[in-house]
Image: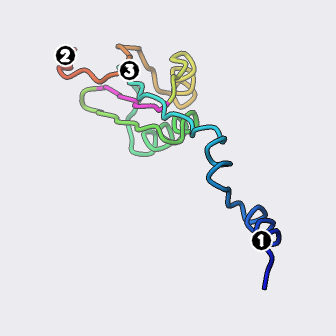
Amino acid sequence: MRSIASIAVFLACAGVASPAARAQQAPPPQVAAEHYYYFACQGITSDYTEKVLTEALRGMDAEMVVSIDRPQQAMKLVARYPLNKQEVISTAAQYGVALADRRSGTAPETNTPRE
C-alpha cells in the first residue's frame, strides 16, 4: 500500500492541486474586449495582395479578424487587443496598400455609413 505522503508527492508532481491550493491560485486572466478598426483602403488589386496583407496584420494579433471589401475599398479589423493605428497603416504600406483611418472603438457600429 502506498502511504498518504507518497500519494501527495505524486499528485504534486502531476500538477494536481488540492482544493485549498486551487483557492489560493490567481484567477485566469480576463478576456480582452474586442476592438474595431475601420479603414478606407486603396491598392488591394489582387487576391495575393489581400492574402499577404491579411497574414501580415494577423502578425499583430493572431486572433484578429480581417474583413476586406475590395469593391467598396473598405477594411474592418476586429482585434482582441488595442492596436496602434499607425503601425497598421505602416504595415499595409509595405505591401503597396494605402489605408486611411475611418473610425475605431470597442463596440461595432450597427449603421455603417457608406462614403
Q: Judging from the image, what secondary structure is the residue with disc 1 in?
A: helix
Q: Amino acid at mark 3?
A: Thr
In terms of depth relative to the viewer, which is nearer, 67 or 82? 82
Q: Tell me where the magenta segment starts and ends, as one range.
A: 73-80
Q: Which residue is mark 3?
A: 106
Q: Identify the amino acid type marked 1.
A: Ile
Apparent side of residue 60 relative to residue 9 in the rendered image (left or right): left
Q: Is residue 48 magenta?
A: no
Tags 3 and 1 touching, CB below 8 Å: no
Q: Secondary structure at mark 3?
A: loop
Nearer to us: label 3 or label 1 = 1
Image: 47 above or below 14: above
Task: Provide residue 9's location: percent of width, then percent of height.
Answer: 81, 66
**Which residue is located at x 68 percent, y 56 percent?**
17
78 up-or-down from 84: above or below: below
Residue 40, numbered label: none
Mark toward the start of the polypeptide (3 vs 2): 3
Q: Residues within 10 Å of mark 2 (few under 14, many from 20)?
A: few
Which of the two labelled residues, at mark 1 and mark 2, occupies the earlier sequence position? 1
Q: Which residue is mark 1?
A: 4
Residue appearing at x 48%, y 35% in the figure: 31
Q: Earlier in the sequence, mark 3 or mark 1?
A: 1
Tag 2 secondary structure: loop
Q: What's the residue type where badge 2 is placed?
A: Pro
Q: Residues within 10 Å of mark 3 (few under 14, many from 20)?
A: some
| Quarter of the image with the N terminus in it | bottom right
Task: Locate residue 47, reporting x and y percent.
Answer: 39, 45
- On screen, residue 19 versus residue 32, left or right, reads right
